[in-house]
Amino acid sequence: MSTIGASNDISLAVVFPLPFQILALVGLEILGWSTNLHGLDVAGIDVNSSLELRTGTATSLPAHLPASRQSSSLVALYNSIYRIFVIYSSICFAFWLAWRYTTKGEVGLVDVFGYIPAMASLTIICILFYPHNTLHKTERRKFLYAVRRCLFSSWDSAVYFSDVILADIITSFAQVVGDVWLSLCMLIPGNSMLRPQSGVGMSEWILPTVMSLPYLVRLRQCVIEYSHEGNRRSLYNALKYASFPAIYLSALQRLVSGDGGSHIKSSVKTEYWENFIFWLWLLAALVNSLYSFWWDVTNDWDPSRSFAEVANHKRYYHPFGLRHSLYFPLLVYPLLIFLNLILRLTWSMKLFRVVNVSSHADITNFCLKVAELFRRWMWVFIRIEWEMIRKGREGHMKLRTDDEAMDEYEYEMVAPANPERQ
């Protein structure tokens, strides 16, 4: 890293250290999810049915209720999430102001008051697990139950569409999850908040392992789906998440090029492109990005016309070869496809930055993380739109009307009534 680059990174660490960057990205995702639900509702997409959202502590709204009643429950949900965002951002902003006031922008005070961002994170975690009926307990418990279901559900249980959405969102936080590990390493005596350290020796492999965990969660879901349904589509989808070893390749090339602290590194520093590992990583990253892009367009969104629509193209005509059922403005779809391709490739480049641990906290990498959250935010709109259309075609678009006990699912994010059929 150049002297200027190192100076800029230190300046950012003084003003906006890595723990606060993590909190800011989480806040953006909370806001993004609430605007996802809000935008889908405005577009006329039945989110309650698509995701089977449980918007209260009672059973789901009966299917015979008017759409206005069903929409009102969704309005209450995303309004609650908006309020959660306001509370969350207010807490984080207050701690950040305390950080700025105490450090006064001086490098020498950064580690002295390093406990402030740690206290901010601990406060958020305590609120998340706060057991009393305040601070949106229902939404907090639903979220925790949804995370638990994604991480620890049995192999015999079905995979629900809401879990798929949540797990895919978590994959966009892969590097943020790695940042959490780096932030914990900052607390080790001798380390500094100015320069993230991932450890030495074998501990250098912990960071890429932690970053791979979100992909393992989603890969596990695909394998469970295949074991239940025998649908090869789930296996093809699993290939997208099974390519996470590219993260290890990027970490390995840091070692062999002489930049790492491991005993296996090369004795002579070389440029990345001068070793075989770089080209192997580049191939893996490109294959993953292009395959993921193709899967987004042809399977997760499926914006093209079906065979029946093609056969009746005079009756159901749309430009760009798009399907007839479109809930968003026409130009949104080609623009979204283009942006998705660019940001997919950018995401791979971002994962490549793991070769330089200190880059996790620089401003460029922070902007790339924001760009990935923006891509996922756009992805959610079309993914849920297509799920509603697909369920409608298959005759599965209905809400639960049974009055089953709530003991097991009282705090889940969604009602696991109908597993996703892909």
Image (cartoon, rainbow, N blue to C red):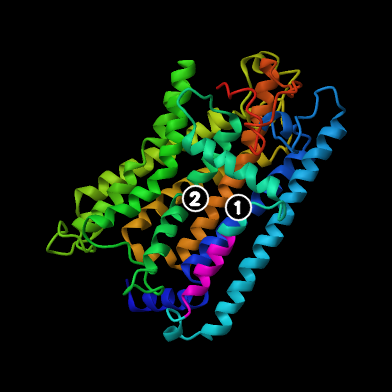
Horizontal side of residue 210 vs 363, given as left or right: left
Q: Residues within 10 Å of mark 2 (few under 14, many from 20)?
A: many
Q: Position of residue 39 (x, y in %)?
A: 74, 44
The amino acid type of the residue labelled 1 equals Glu
Residue under the image location 46 percent in, 75 percent down: 114
Horizontal side of residue 185 vs 99, given as left or right: left
Q: Which span is picked out in magenta?
A: 113-124
Q: Residues within 10 Å of mark 1 (few under 14, many from 20)?
A: many
Q: Which one is nearer the viewer's eye here, 343 or 403? A: 403
Instruction: Specify which label sits upstream in the sequence, 2 or 1.
Output: 1
- Determine the secondary structure under disc 1: helix
Examine the rendering and report whether any part of residue 181 can be seen: yes
* Residue on which disc 1 sits: 29
Quarter of the image containing the N terminus? bottom left
Q: Are marks 2 and 1 in contact (CB under 8 Å)?
A: yes
Tell me which corner region of the image, top left, top right, bottom left or bottom right, holds residue 335: top right
Q: With respect to residue 91, does 166 lie above or below?
A: above
Q: Report the magenta stretch's main SS.
A: helix
Q: Which one is nearer the viewer's eye here, 58 or 4? A: 58
Q: Which mark is residue 173?
A: 2
Quarter of the image containing the C terminus? top right
